[in-house]
Image: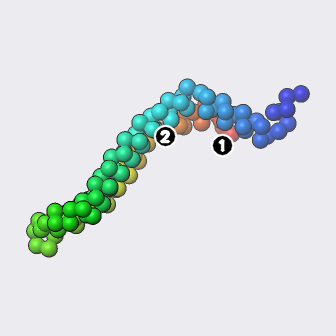
Amino acid sequence: MDPDATNPNATNSSLYREVQQSDEFKDLRKRFRGFVFPCTIFFLTWYFAYVILAAYFPEFMSTRVFGLVNIGLIFGLLQFVTTFGITIAYVRWADKVFDPRADAIRERFMGDQR
């Protein structure tokens, strides 16, 4: 008797291994990393540039653009804009690229077991 046939945890474990070893899943991970890592690097670079500018170049950051609005304030607000922009880009990308592939993998391995 197959030990996996009587142990649901072993069956799930072997299914997860099978999914992780499939070419489709490897491609999905590669695509995910191809989107997320560059976005993360971009945002962290942008964030630390802002922090470094604020810490070491206060005279530049305090340069007035108009009225009481200075470069530091604009860069600070752009941090929020960037966060929302990355979020929107990720949601759109996931809807078009990631989710359909993930659904296909789930359908292939799970079928109607949801």
User: Which is more foreground, mark 2 or mark 1?
Assistant: 2
Query: Could you say which is closer to the camera, residue 71 or residue 6?
Result: 71
Near mark 2 (Cα within 10 A), the count class, few <14, some 14-19 or many ≥20, is some
- Farthest residue, direction bottom: 68
* Residue drawn at point x = 66 percent, y = 36 percent: 16
Whether residue 113 is visible to the viewer of this picture, yes or no, is yes
Amino acid type at circle 2 is Asp
* Residue drawn at point x = 13 percent, y = 66 percent: 63
Secondary structure under the numbered disc 2 in the rendered image: helix
Inter-mark Cα distance, 2 to 1: 16 Å
Amino acid type at circle 1 is Arg
Query: Which percent across, then down, holds residue 19?
Result: 62, 32
Query: Could you say which is closer to the camera, residue 106 or residue 23?
Result: 23
- Farthest residue, direction right: 1
Residue 114, which numbered label?
1
The vertical placement of 97 against 50, above or below, is: above
Residue 68 is drawn in which quadrant? bottom left
Query: Which percent across, then down, holds residue 76?
Result: 27, 63
Locate the N terminus by quadrant. top right
Secondary structure under the numbered disc 1 in the rendered image: loop
Query: Which percent across, then down, holds residue 106?
Result: 60, 36
Kindly identify which residue carries mark 2: 99
